[in-house]
Structure formats: C-alpha cells, structure tokens
Amino acid sequence: MICIEYSAKRYVPGLYGYMTLQRLDGTVVYEGDSFDAGANPFEKLDEGKGVAVIRIPPRTFGPGTFQIYLSFASRLDDAGPGNR
C-alpha cells in the first residue's frame, strides 16, 4: 500500500493518475492507472488536503528498493497550465 498526502488548490475535471514502480536497475515491476480499480477515485477529488491510498496487488514485488513515478493529467480540464 502506498499513501500519498496531497493538497489540491481546486477541483480538476477528468483528473486521472498513472504510476510506475521499478527496481533501481530500471526493471518495471508494476504499471497502473487510476482506472484499474474500476471507478477513477481522482475524478471526484475536491480541493483541499487529503490522502490518496494506492493498493498494490499482493505478491507483485519482493523485498528491495524501488522507485515510484507518479503523473497526473486531465483531458477535460480547459483551465490551462497558467490557472493551476
């Protein structure tokens, strides 16, 4: 389980997230996006502070050190980068 504390300045329509977990040698262990669990939990993310919990399927990776890459986007947000 990965917990991410966030602070959102405003609601972003159509927000979704993408995550990659990889070993330090670059081997990708897990890739997923916020649609993998069915309903996208970021779609209704209101402004303010909170915690997003990402549950990784059991036995996905063993012991070791991993890098986490997160990205978020919205194809429905017309506010543009200057308004974020």
Image: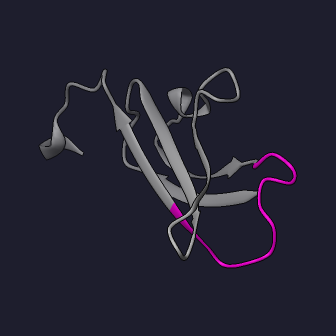
Q: Looking at the image, which is closer to me, 46 or 55? A: 55
Which residue does the image show at 47% across and 33% down from the upper left? 16
Residue 21 quadrant: bottom right
Q: Is residue 62 magenta?
A: yes
Q: Is residue 80 above or below residue 40?
A: below
Colouring style:
one colour
Q: Looking at the image, which is closer to me, 45 or 24? A: 24
Which residue does the image show at 37% across and 48% down from the upper left? 9
Q: Is residue 3 above or below residue 65?
A: above
Q: Main secondary structure of the magenta part?
A: loop
Q: In which quadrant of the rendered image does the N terminus lie?
A: bottom right
The spot of residue 11 in percent (x, y) is: 41, 34
The spot of residue 38 in percent (x, y) is: 68, 21
The spot of residue 54 in percent (x, y) is: 69, 48
Q: Is residue 10 magenta?
A: no
Q: Looking at the image, which is closer to me, 68 or 3? A: 68
Q: Is residue 10 left or right of residue 3?
A: left
Q: Is residue 39 left or right of residue 68?
A: right
**What are the residue bounds of the magenta stretch?**
56-68
- Count of numbered tags: 0
Q: Is residue 15 left or right of residue 55?
A: left
Q: Looking at the image, which is closer to me, 43 or 1? A: 1
Which residue does the image show at 56% across and 63% down from the upper left? 27
